[in-house]
Image: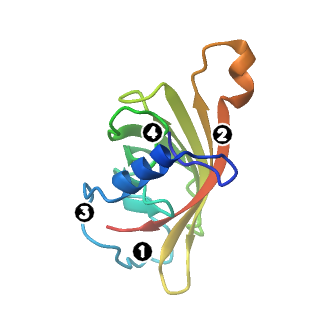
Amino acid sequence: VLCQADNIPRGENDVAEETKATNTKWWPGRKQKHPARNGKCNLTGWWENDLGSRMHVFAVDSQGNFSGEYHTAVSSTQKPIKPSPLIGSQHLDEDGQCTFGFTVNWKKFSDSTAVFVGQCFAADGGEETLHTSWLLREKVDSLSSDWKATRIGHNIFTRVG
């Protein structure tokens, strides 16, 4: 559903769907540099990863909790891709290079769930990046298929709005 690792074979339909989804313009504006505030990362806003998936993180509360929407650009399902809810938490620390985690429930078009963990980095020039690793669990029909139900990968997100 989410991001397919390089070592997972993909058919022509998967590539066509990824290209089609990546070309969809349901997000705001073009990529822009947004300086980190006071050298600290701020998760709030729009982010895009290296595969063209976008996420919108709503306001982070004083405890580090946040919610948002994930707009994946890749999927293995034949159903139309729809924005999916995400919910997460970040570790609030003094240097602002926070660690965080969030879950995406693909319930609107797939029987799978993904969890992301990562860290926000603010470069000297102020540009923020999110370095993440993820696990994706797809529903399988039997225990004998369990071996292929979980995928692992990583993405780097940059701020886009």
Disc 2 or 4, which lies upstream in sequence? 4
- Residue at label 3? 28
Colour treatment of the image: rainbow
Q: CA gap, disc 3 to disc 4?
A: 21 Å
Q: CA gap, disc 2 to disc 1?
A: 35 Å
- Residue at label 2? 151
Disc 2 or 1, which lies upstream in sequence? 1
Can you say whether 102 is above or below 38 in the image?
above
Q: Residue 25: in sight, yes or no?
A: yes
Seen in the image, is 125 located left or right of residue 93? left
Q: Nearer the viewer, mark 3 or mark 4?
A: 3
Q: Nearer the viewer, mark 2 or mark 1?
A: 2
Q: Residue 73: in sight, yes or no?
A: no
- Kindly indicate whether the residue at mark 4 contacts the one at mark 3 (C-beta within 8 angstroms): no
Query: Which residue, as the protein is rendered here, is positioned at the far front?
Result: 12
* Residue type at tag 4: Ile
Q: CA gap, disc 2 to disc 4?
A: 20 Å
